[in-house]
Amino acid sequence: MQGLLSHIIHDQHLILTAERSIFWEAEKTLIVADLHLGKTGHFRKAGIGIPQGVYKHDLQRLMHQLYFFKADRLVIVGDFTHSVVNNELELFRKWRQDFALLDILLVKGNHDILADKWYEETQITVEAKSWEAGPFTFVHDLNDIPEDPLLRNSFYLSGHMHPAVLLRGTGKQSLRFPCYFFSTEYGVLPAFSRFTGSFLVEPTPGDQVFAIVDKEIMLIEKKIRRSRKATED
């Protein structure tokens, strides 16, 4: 597979992918954030003609990642769904049947508002705010990280921000790309869904940025400023 990059955190081997997911090798766990399943259906209900193929393509990408890595577990770091139940979420039920043995865990995000019964019926384990495993704590929003450094006893992996980086060319040319970014205390995944907005992170020393450019991942030598501001889409 093109677009794979090894990254070590607390002696754990992570594989960053150009498909906006992280594979945690030791735990055979695929990690994603901000799928926003059902969002295109939500827009169509509002009279905006977004093709359903956008949603189906996201599910196909997810399926391909799970098969490629032979993952035993899928961890979703919030905003798995976008709103209330619609036809697209019913399509997910059928998709789930093909992965009946897959352990799926969701750390709830601000868009995850479905009734508990829906998660139970689709065999998804739900954590309200955070979930700890090994050296990591998974949270949807960086604002859920304790302010007091003495209370931080692990490395945090989050979503919500939909981070992107601006690459500038000669003159006034620039392009925006989704990215992963890591500080010494936390990392933020790009939104898995391609049908989302993004928040530009700005350079500052101390953090690593990995831009997703087409089907490749590239380390941006510039550093980014840590920010807890997020998109609201």
Image (spheres, grey):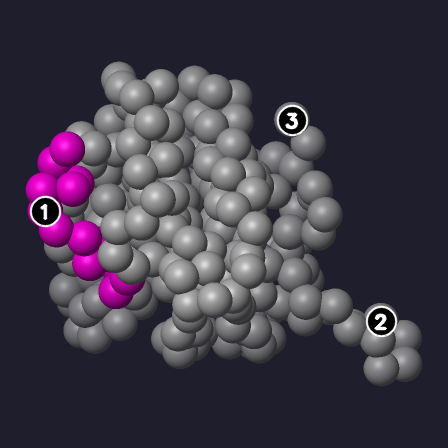
Q: Which residue is mark 2?
A: 169
Q: Secondary structure at mark 1?
A: helix
The residue at the point 52 percent across, 32 percent down is 60
Most foreground residue, 61 or 171: 61
Q: Position of residue 119 (x, y in %)?
A: 17, 40
3D distance between C-alphas at marks 3 and 2: 28 Å
**Residue 120 belongs to the span the image colors magenta:** yes
Query: Is the residue marked by circle 3 packed among few (<14), some (14-19), or many (20+) residues within 10 Å?
Result: few
Vertical side of 111 occupied by 37: above or below: above
Counting residues from the start of the chain, the first of labels 3 and 1 encountered is 3
3D distance between C-alphas at marks 2 and 1: 48 Å
**Residue 85 belongs to the span the image colors magenta:** no
Query: Is the residue marked by circle 2 packed among few (<14), some (14-19), or many (20+) residues within 10 Å?
Result: few
Q: Position of residue 25 (x, y in %)?
A: 41, 27
Q: Residue furthest right?
A: 171
Q: Which residue is mark 3?
A: 1
Start-end of magenta stretch: 108-121
Vertical side of 89 occupied by 171: above or below: below
Most foreground residue, 32 or 204: 32
Q: Which residue is mark 1?
A: 116
